[in-house]
Image (tube, coloured by chain):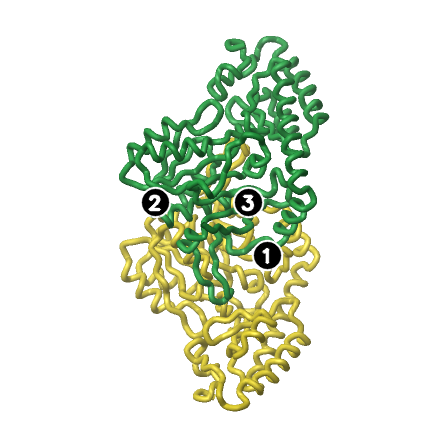
Chain colours: A green, B yellow
Amino acid sequence: MSTGGYITNCGTEGNLHGILVGREVLPDGILYASRESHYSIFKAARMYRMECEKVETLNSGEIDCDDFKAKLLRHQDKPAIINVNIGTTVKGAVDDLDLVIQKLEEAGFSQDRFYIHVDGALFGLMMPFVKRAPKVTFKKPIGSVSVSGHKFVGCPMPCGVQITRLEHINALSRNVECLASRDATIMGSRNGHAPIFLWYTLNRKGYRGFQKEVQKCLRNAHYFKDRLIEAGIGAMLNELSSTVVFERPHDEEFIRKWQLACKGNIAHVVVMPNVTIEKLDDFLNELVQKRATWFEDGTFQPYCIASDVGENSCLCAQHK
Amino acid sequence: MSTGGYITNCGTEGNLHGILVGREVLPDGILYASRESHYSIFKAARMYRMECEKVETLNSGEIDCDDFKAKLLRHQDKPAIINVNIGTTVKGAVDDLDLVIQKLEEAGFSQDRFYIHVDGALFGLMMPFVKRAPKVTFKKPIGSVSVSGHKFVGCPMPCGVQITRLEHINALSRNVECLASRDATIMGSRNGHAPIFLWYTLNRKGYRGFQKEVQKCLRNAHYFKDRLIEAGIGAMLNELSSTVVFERPHDEEFIRKWQLACKGNIAHVVVMPNVTIEKLDDFLNELVQKRATWFEDGTFQPYCIASDVGENSCLCAQHK
């Protein structure tokens, strides 16, 4: 079994590539992706004119494998192309790759009738350093995996790495005579600086350096989540994640100032190596102060986030 | 009429975007592109599952509008999505936009039944500075136009600009709540350095500076073509181009040393602002020297390039 890949322009290019390889290997395959997958997955389905089944998620943000199996059983006549998330965009949830494979087997899909693309844009480069984390490896029946280079690794421009099985890449590549080479990428052109930054960072920090940074990120994320809850703010942190989800701040100016990404009633902070305890404290102290003014006269109440992250993580008036 | 666009990662992203907008506006449209179009156009057709008609070309590399009209007439029941080249990859040929539009009218295609994407990756930023060159403008019924930023402009990383009509962009864009913005791009992520380099170069050189550089490129290209022919080497230079096409050198080592792009029996040199008369002379002198040794004992003959560029431009044993 041999694999190959290339340096992409971003996580989206990796996903567009992985899903395209899947479609070229299984032309009438249906794309299955949890509804908390990155929007580039659904963009791919539309671009590539693929049938697409959105799969429900658990409160954690992980793919709901019971719903996945039910949907597989409804379409047993067609092959399955599955997007598995290693760190969803909003909640940092890690889909259970082994359970996904098990459900495929239970639903009667043999290995030549499914293709799994693993979207590791956010957490793919961190998970190998997390103790007891499940493993993403080509020893399992996956077709491709992509990661970003400008998130945890910190490259100064968007970039990523896409790896796939070489046996599949022939389905995609075309001889381009005037380049005297084959093109099997999405973009054709590649940024030559990105591999230099990736190489430099990998060598400068090394395996131990990355391990330490992952541990620091996870530690800081736990600290942040605990302090949010102590302050009476509903929050959730997945076990395999440094993304802390919490009650959306009531003030758009505060959201803009801290450049918070929000979705419905929740906001999140992705604790990367540059996010220090001091910065988290600053943020938290300001949030606590502001909340006191937002909820002072009783006109506003903290948002309920039970439908986003479950009742256990919600500290609204009804659930606390 | 208002237009908008974005800074892409390369010419291919512009083409992928333009063709996708065309497909979303005319979902069952057939893609028409000359066979000398950039390979990303045919990649798009395959990615997007579009029916595609390859149109023949003239010796110059321009789209053969008679063949185009004949193919249009064969598919009058379906809308047409057309790729128009402003500088083809190999020969630098400029398709006749006005004639393409005329043929669409003659074949009975009203403006709501066709979409034209203009691929100006190579020559799109040079043509506005060429006297008497035809104009690419949204006053004509085109849908989108893309150019590269790392060729004539010289940005140090692959990038480009894609411009389209805003009325079409809604067909493509999706609200992405967690970004608090809409995504209407292919890649989602964008390189923030590219606009800075583009802005800097545009401002440093200015309109007059670009005009001078275009004139220098065209002058040097003419000089190079004339010297090739003087030396008995078959060569062609399109009127609206700085790409000189000539007989492929017989020696792969020579091709590698000069990093020549070759296709069949022809090679080309794209005369950009960094290609000086001195460099062209060095190249030519070495080529003339090497040719003397390649053809010394009569075992090898110069390639015939008549089928690539026409008999008039060929100086092989038969045509000279």
Residue shown at 60%/58% (left/top)? B150
Q: Which residue is mark 3?
A: A10
Residue shown at 63%/14% (left/top)? A230
On residue B165, which mark appears?
none
Q: Chain of mark 3?
A: A
How far apart in space, not on screen, are marks 1 and 2 (Cα)?
Answer: 43 Å
Q: Chain of mark 2?
A: A
CB under 8 Å between discs 2 and 3: no
Q: Secondary structure at mark 3?
A: loop
Q: Are marks 2 and 3 on the same chain?
A: yes
Which residue occupies the foreground of this view, A7 or B261?
A7
Badge 2: residue crowd in 10 Å (few <14, some 14–19, many ≥20): few
How far apart in space, not on screen, are marks 1 and 3 (Cα)?
Answer: 19 Å
Q: Residue furthest right?
A: A278
Q: Is residue B259 left or right of residue B173?
A: right
Residue shown at 41%/51% (left/top)? A168
Where residue B180 sits in the image (x, y, percent)? 54, 32
Which residue occupies the foreground of this view, A218 or B76?
A218
Q: Which residue is mark 2?
A: A112
Where residue A139 sits in the image (x, y, percent)? 46, 42
Badge 1: residue crowd in 10 Å (few <14, some 14–19, many ≥20): many
Q: Quadrant of residue A285?
A: top right
Where residue B74 sits in the image (x, y, percent)? 27, 61
Q: Is residue B37 above or below residue B296?
A: above
On residue B149, which mark appears?
1
Amino acid type, mark 2: Asp
Amino acid type, mark 3: Cys
Where residue A115 sits in the image (x, y, percent)? 39, 42
Amino acid type, mark 1: Gly
Q: Quadrant of residue A315?
A: top right
